[in-house]
Amino acid sequence: MSTSPMVLEPAAAVAPAVRGRARGTLLVLAAMLLVALNLRTSITSVGSLLTEVREGLQLSGLMAGVVTTMPTIAFAFFGAFTPVLVRRFSAPRVLVAAMVALVAGQALRVATGSAAVFVITSALALSGIAIGNVLMPMLVKQHFPERTGLVTGAYSVSMSIGATIGAAATVPIAHAFGSWRAGLGVWAILALAAIPLWLPAALRHRAASRATAVPGAETIARVRPGATRLGWAMAIFFGAQSLSGYAAMGWLPTLFRDAGFSPENAGLLLGILSVVGVPMGLIMPSLTARLPNLHGLILALAGLMIVAYLGMMLAPRAGAYLWVVVLSVGQSAFPLALTVLGLRARTAEGTVALSAFAQSIGYLFAALGPLLVGYFYGLTGAWTVPMLFLVAVALLQATAGLAIARPRFIEDE
């Protein structure tokens, strides 16, 4: 009889704690998804209004080219410094600073009449995105080590939704307010909303010294992905799939217009590419996390991309819708890559080191994609050589992918 209270009291005490942890976990997940929602809107919104921005700021063709190539360059440059920041400060503090940079950059660039200031403030916004790109796999590893695939899929889908919203809603907002500045500036509000969710955690971590800023800081200093085969394989895989993605976004509408589609239908085909990618962004990370070996999956995705590129080269009009769907499934190598960043490190600190290296080198490589496709297209006046170039990139992606397919850890190399 006397044992009953002894059983009930611990249960009563544990239940609120469990509920509290569950609420905390959901809050962290919501905060991560809101950050992810902001990691592409600033980019796709500019693309939607580039003509109006060029006219409003009198941008030269060269400056417009700088604006369109800045994202990949900024991701490469600023992403490389993220491990240095994490060694000095906690991840929540770094993330809050990144979101502040994103808000400030987006707000300031619509308040200027100077083309140079617009470029500089855009770079400020992109620096925040670059840091967020690198931190997300680390945060997944820290907070959801047993649900890497599911959470990576969720934030990958959130990124895709943000990109789609930025592309689709920017022009109507600009028209509603009668200014391209409103169309671009409104996204600063969305970025601002992410800051309060991370601010309490940031304020709890106010360490000032490098040695005590983050538990495991020594691990970050010790891990050198650039000196490992795994690090370079991950960078090449990430870069190859990103190159293909940026090339497709930049040039597929032109390819389909050359094949006889109207501008509206060519845009619709690009939209299908994005729409199909949303469910794949949720499915692929979970599948990646469950498979003990990724050889078959990596080869299958590269094979689908090759089939799509050859189809676009040989029958761009007759099979256009099929090729776009096949290519979109193949390009789910992107959420696979994000998941593998977390799976190939033992610790959150190793994850951020690998993520920074792979994304910095990878995005630098990816910046060549639209430029080289455009060069080959201009040189030949046809799509055969550009498509064969993308086939070669898919083969490179498959080769690098085989080197990251089996379970191994960056800390061990």
Image (tube, rainbow, N blue to C red):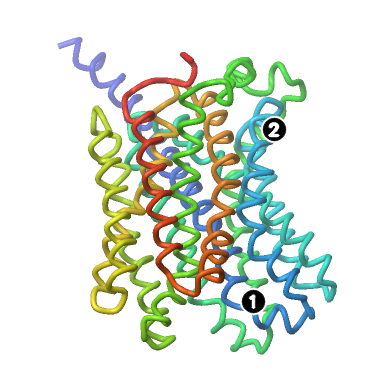
71 with respect to 12 (left or right): right
Q: Residue furthest top?
A: 2
> Depth check: 38 or 133 in front?
133
> Based on the displayed image, in which of its 4 quarters is residue 41 positioned?
bottom right
Amino acid at circle 1: Leu
Q: How many marks?
A: 2
- Residue occupying the far left of the picture: 1
Residue drawn 51% across the image and 33% down it: 138
x, y percentage for residue 97? 70, 45
| Of callouts 1 and 2, the N-terminal one | 1
Q: Which mark is residue 50?
A: 1
Locate residue 28 relative to residue 191 in the image: left or right.
Answer: left
Q: Position of residue 165 (x, y in %)?
A: 48, 70
* Mark 1 element type: helix
Residue indicated by mark 2 = 85
Looking at the rendered structure, the kind of residue marked 2 is: Leu
Nearest to the observer: residue 8 or residue 191: 191
Q: Quadrant of the N terminus?
A: top left
Residue 179 position within the rendered picture, expressed as x and y whole percent measured from the top left: 68, 85
